[in-house]
Image (cartoon, rainbow, N blue to C red):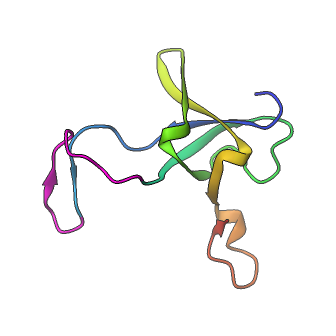
Amino acid sequence: MLHDRVLVKTEAGEGERRSTGGILIPATAEISKRCAWAEAVAVGQSVRSVEPGDRVLYDPEDKLEVEVRGATYVLLRERDLHAVAADRFEGSEDATGLYL
């Protein structure tokens, strides 16, 4: 990866899903604009707050998909990330495990 780029693997598929109450939501249902979580796979040398293995929050509307060896990934800039969830942030005082 070059400069401030982050390569992530999305966690959720585009298929059917269940609500927290157990209701089945079909894949064709319209979803309100919301961010999605993904796992960082690789980061560029200028990225400061993300390491491979971290979970990151991003806007799925602003994504650039790329296929590498048959797997689909999303390529983002570090500035396009909204939050980083990592175990290394939990060790500090008053930490939630999120870096916003």
Q: Quadrant of the N terminus?
A: top right
Question: Which stretch is magenta?
Answer: 20-33
**Residue positioned most to the right:** 46
Residue 57 place in picture, x, y as percent: 56, 53
**Residue positioned most to the top:** 69
Give the prevailing secondary structure in the magenta stretch: loop
* Image: 49 above or below 78: below
* Image: 75 above or below 80: above
The quadrant in which residue 83 appears is bottom right
* Image: 12 above or below 71: below
* Image: 93 above or below 48: below
Q: Quadrant of the C terminus?
A: bottom right
What is the number of callouts on the image? Answer: 0
Residue 10 place in picture, x, y as percent: 47, 39
Which residue is pictured at 71% across the width and 68% down the height?
89
The quadrant in which residue 99 appears is bottom right
Which residue is pictured at 75% across the width and 84% down the height?
93
> Does the magenta run of residues contain 32?
yes
Which residue is pictured at 19% across the width and 39% down the height?
28
Which residue is pictured at 48% across the width and 53% down the height?
35
Residue nearest the viewer, comparing 81 with 42: 81
Residue nearest the viewer, comparing 69 with 38: 38
> Is 30 left, or right, of 96 in this rendering?
left
> Is 80 left, or right, of 19 in this rendering?
right
> Is 2 left, or right, of 86 in this rendering?
right
> Does the magenta run of residues contain 5?
no
Residue 58 place in picture, x, y as percent: 56, 48
The quadrant in which residue 39 appears is top right
Residue 9 place in picture, x, y as percent: 52, 36
**Residue positioned most to the left:** 23
